[in-house]
Image (cartoon, rainbow, N blue to C red):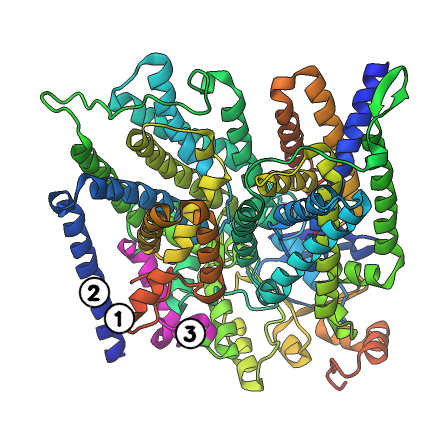
């Protein structure tokens, strides 16, 4: 029984990180129709910035989180305002451009921070463990679950209950009508991209508690985000949450049962979903 | 009308001259290049073929696939595994098998990936490619003892009496396969099938309404593309003497994309030009700033996308012929 | 002989039935027009008949065969040809390219991979013939995007005819055309072979009354009238709908 609970908690905590990573990318894809393959690289920038602040300069983890989010948001916004917004009607070019930035950002991080991977780190008060069902369980993971849930609720509220959320949903369904209604779409898009990148950067710092910080995170995290999006469906917080948790849990149990082939549980899930329900479990039409 | 015909004729002459000059150069270059230069030319031909194979699925069919290295690597790994586990050196076994395995992988992946379209297709091809990368990384049987990847590949045995391959002979072997592939692909893109592919890229819904089974056309393009990438992969393993999981993953998938776009997507020789530029830049970057090569590659790519979308090859052509080329045009 | 039978056809989008329990039949050689206010479901109906959409309910029969689940390209082979509401030619390719591609679509050698297209002389000649008939041979090497809108429309319909279909589906052919261009279209249609069946959706009542021997009126996805032009003209319900909903869009012929 405790084996089950522990793995479940592992799965859900990892799944929360996946959710955070995927949600930003999914919203941008759904609301703006923009494929941002640099999303994982932006996560990485946030993680490095957060590490620098929290570990190197020894500020608190919370400050690191904030700085991580902001740095990522700035980078993301720069890419969007500078280059990406000229490619709105050209999905192929967006893909290619943002992919080019994966290389650029990864190499820049390598240049600035050097190639040695940073081990996972967390807030001072989150080090150590709590007892669950007679076993020691890391506090950090529980904190991730809680933060993840809070963020999920917050983002869902943004999506469903606010004007920005309504714009996002309108933009998803019909861009021309939305702009015809006098909504400044350009500004809305910039804001959405900013928020999406902020989430990515914050996710980078939150995720660093589990994954650490490395220069190959750019591609690795992108791949995770893509799998979650494929499984959960594009364009909604719910989809990203469901996809993230599902993948996280499947991965955790996969690792526990056949560690060598752990990664394949993710791929297998993805392939099954593609065959059975190509738009993803909670997907909206793009 | 008079001027139009003459201009088209002019273009055709220009094309023929360029191709002839290029072919002459390729045939003779071992005579005046050092063995380093020769190696570079071999590398160029392999990657040009890789890029041309990608052009079928991306340039002509319009499907942006991010997992093309899966087929390249499948070809290369077949050769490597046959050598590692079965001691096979014979080109006439390894190469055809590599081709078949690559085509089979493409056939399999195509069925999964073509369940979806647009952005999803891209994501899926990416994931499938990374899945193979992951397999090659983790499964012991797919690696030489104690390392990532497979070493110990040597120049192939052609079983021709009295001929022991050296790198110069290997260059000519690669050139032969490159030439054959060019001819086959050229006929393909100018055939009814190839032309229909372009139509499907332009407006799939219309093509379906006039009678084309658009899924089948796209699927065949995916498989053919993968098969030729497999040939490139086979030739690569004999050149590189080493295959690694990276040759299956996105880092390698990115390369034919870069080359095809730099040279001119959807034009026949664009990828070749792109390969020239790529090999050139890669060579100098690896000498001058090896650490910053990915940055340079990424930066170059971004610049091309933003400011020279049609590709360097197309710009050169325009310069030479002073006419705006159309693509996918059928000559009656 | 019955060309098309539509039976209890419905298509649901979200909470709305764009097409709601539609049934009707077409006999060989009939010239039938479907009219109705915007949003009545006309294009959706076409999409269902031609296969771009699959119905939520109901069946479609083509020459007695149930084609409800058949993909679009197979319906082309069975004899459907369609002109779309927004012109769907391949805009970046030349006129000749478009003609050849359309003609190849229903020929068996469209899968050939090793011979250049120019080897297939019979298709080429058909293309020449079709373009000449449309008066567009001179522009064969121009990209379609450079043609005037009326020429594009003529080309699209002309190429649809070149497919030698049994059922021609025309979705708002007169949209965006001048009066002269519209009468060109009318001429093309009236000169068609007797055994070709034409189903046309349009808002231009002059054209509709000139071409159609039978009119079906749709409103909110349902058939509210089906009869000869005279019957439709006289129908109270139809008059109410047009007068009440969109007087500016359409004008019924004065009684």
Of marks 3 and 1, the one in the foreground: 1
Residue lying at 67% horizontally and 33% vertically, measured from the top left: A119
Of tags 2 and 3, which is closer to the observer? Answer: 2
What chain letter is assigned to the residue under label 2?
B
Q: Classify mark 3: residues with Cα within 10 Å, few (<14), some (14-19) or many (20+).
A: some
Give the mark nearest the N terminus, 2 or 1: 2
Q: Position of residue C212 (x, y in %)?
A: 64, 71
- The part of the image, by quadrant, that contains residue A81 is bottom right
Q: Quadrant of residue C96?
A: bottom left
* Residue at numbered disc 1: B321
Q: Is residue B201 rendered magenta in the image?
A: no
Q: Magenta span covers which residues?
A: C118-145
Q: Is residue C123 magenta?
A: yes
Is there any visible trace of residue B29 in the rendered image? yes
Q: Is residue B316 left or right of residue A95?
A: left
Q: Residue furthest left?
A: B162
Instruction: Name the dominant secondary structure of the magenta segment.
Output: helix
Numbered badge on residue B14: 2
Tag 2–tag 1 contact (CB < 8 Å): yes
x, y percent for residue A106: 55, 46
């Amino acid at each position: 029984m405790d084996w089950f609970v522990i793995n479940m908690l592992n799965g859900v905590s990892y799944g929360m990180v996946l959710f955070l990573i995927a949600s930003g990318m999914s919203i941008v894809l759904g609301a703006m129709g923009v494929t941002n393959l640099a999303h994982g690289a932006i996560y990485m920038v946030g993680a490095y910035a957060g590490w620098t602040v929290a570990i190197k300069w020894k500020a608190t983890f919370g400050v690191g989180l904030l700085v991580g989010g902001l740095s990522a948001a700035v980078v993301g916004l720069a890419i969007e305002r500078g280059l990406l917004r000229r490619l709105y009607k050209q999905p192929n070019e967006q893909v290619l451009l943002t992919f080019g930035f994966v290389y650029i950002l990864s190499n820049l991080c390598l240049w600035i921070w050097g190639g040695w991977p940073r081990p996972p780190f967390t807030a001072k008060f989150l080090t150590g463990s709590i007892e669950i069902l007679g076993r020691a369980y890391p506090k950090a993971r529980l904190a991730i679950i809680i933060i993840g849930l809070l963020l999920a609720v917050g983002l869902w509220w943004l999506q469903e209950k606010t004007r920005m959320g309504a714009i996002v949903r309108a933009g998803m369904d019909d861009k021309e009508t939305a702009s015809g209604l006098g909504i400044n779409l350009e500004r809305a898009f910039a804001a959405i991209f900013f928020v999406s990148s902020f989430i990515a950067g914050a996710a980078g710092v939150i995720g660093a508690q589990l994954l650490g910080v490395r220069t190959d995170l750019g591609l690795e995290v992108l791949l995770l985000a893509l799998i979650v999006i494929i499984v959960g469906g594009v364009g909604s917080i719910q989809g990203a949450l469901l996809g993230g948790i599902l993948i996280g849990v499947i991965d955790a149990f996969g690792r526990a049962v056949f560690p060598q082939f752990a990664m394949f549980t993710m791929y297998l899930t993805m392939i099954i979903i593609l065959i059975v329900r190509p738009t993803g479990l909670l997907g909206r039409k793009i | 009308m008079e001027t139009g015909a003459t201009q088209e004729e002019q273009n055709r002459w220009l094309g023929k001259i360029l191709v002839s000059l290029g072919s002459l150069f390729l045939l003779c270059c071992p005579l005046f290049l050092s063995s380093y230069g020769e190696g570079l030319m071999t590398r160029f031909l392999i990657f040009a073929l890789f890029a041309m194979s990608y052009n079928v699925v991306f340039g002509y069919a319009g499907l942006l696939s991010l997992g093309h290295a899966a087929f390249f690597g499948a070809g290369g790994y077949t050769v490597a595994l046959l050598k590692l586990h079965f001691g096979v050196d014979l080109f006439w076994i390894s190469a055809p098998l590599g081709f078949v395995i690559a085509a089979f992988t493409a056939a399999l992946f195509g069925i999964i990936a073509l369940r979806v379209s647009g952005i999803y297709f891209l994501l899926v091809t990416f994931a499938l490619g990374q899945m193979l990368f992951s397999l090659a990384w983790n499964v012991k049987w797919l690696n030489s003892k104690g390392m990532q990847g497979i070493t110990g590949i040597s120049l192939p045995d052609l079983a021709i009496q009295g001929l022991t391959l050296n790198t110069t002979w290997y260059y000519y072997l690669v050139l032969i396969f490159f030439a054959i592939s060019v001819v086959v692909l050229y006929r393909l893109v100018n055939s009814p099938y190839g032309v229909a592919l372009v139509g499907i890229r332009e407006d799939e819904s219309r093509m379906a309404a006039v009678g084309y089974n658009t899924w089948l056309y796209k699927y065949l393009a995916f498989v053919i593309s993968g098969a030729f990438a497999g040939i490139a992969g086979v030739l690569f393993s004999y050149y590189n003497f080493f295959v690694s999981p990276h040759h299956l993953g996105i880092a390698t998938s990115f390369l034919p994309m870069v080359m095809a776009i730099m040279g001119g997507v959807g034009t026949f020789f664009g990828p070749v030009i792109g390969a020239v530029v790529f090999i050139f830049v890669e060579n100098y970057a690896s000498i001058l700033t090896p650490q910053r090569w990915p940055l340079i590659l990424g930066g170059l790519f971004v610049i091309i996308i933003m400011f020279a979308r049609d590709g360097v090859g197309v710009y050169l052509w325009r310069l030479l012929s002073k006419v705006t080329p159309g693509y996918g045009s059928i000559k009656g | 002989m019955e060309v098309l039978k539509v039976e209890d056809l419905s298509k649901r989008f979200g909470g709305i039935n764009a097409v709601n329990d539609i049934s009707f039949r077409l006999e060989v050689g009939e010239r039938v027009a479907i009219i109705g206010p915007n949003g009545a479901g006309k294009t959706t109906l076409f999409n269902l008949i031609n296969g771009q959409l699959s119905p939520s309910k109901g069946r479609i029969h083509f020459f007695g065969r149930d084609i409800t689940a058949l993909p679009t390209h197979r319906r082309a082979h069975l004899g459907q040809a369609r002109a779309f509401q927004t012109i769907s030619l391949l805009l970046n390719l030349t006129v000749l390219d478009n003609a050849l591609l359309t003609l190849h679509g229903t020929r068996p050698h469209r899968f050939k991979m090793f011979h250049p297209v120019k080897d297939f002389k019979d298709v080429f000649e058909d293309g020449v013939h079709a373009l000449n008939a449309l008066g567009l041979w001179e522009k064969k090497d121009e990209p379609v995007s450079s043609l005037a809108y009326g020429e594009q429309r003529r080309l699209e319909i002309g190429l649809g005819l070149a497919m030698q279909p049994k059922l021609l589906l025309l979705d708002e052919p007169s949209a965006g055309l001048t009066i002269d261009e519209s009468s060109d279209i009318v001429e093309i249609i009236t000169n068609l072979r007797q055994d070709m069946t034409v189903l046309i959706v349009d808002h231009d009542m002059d054209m509709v009354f000139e071409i159609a021997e039978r009119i079906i009126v749709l409103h909110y996805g349902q058939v509210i009238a089906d009869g000869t032009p005279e019957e439709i003209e006289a129908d109270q319900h139809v008059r109410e709908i047009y007068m009440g909903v969109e007087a500016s869009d359409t004008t019924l012929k004065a009684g």
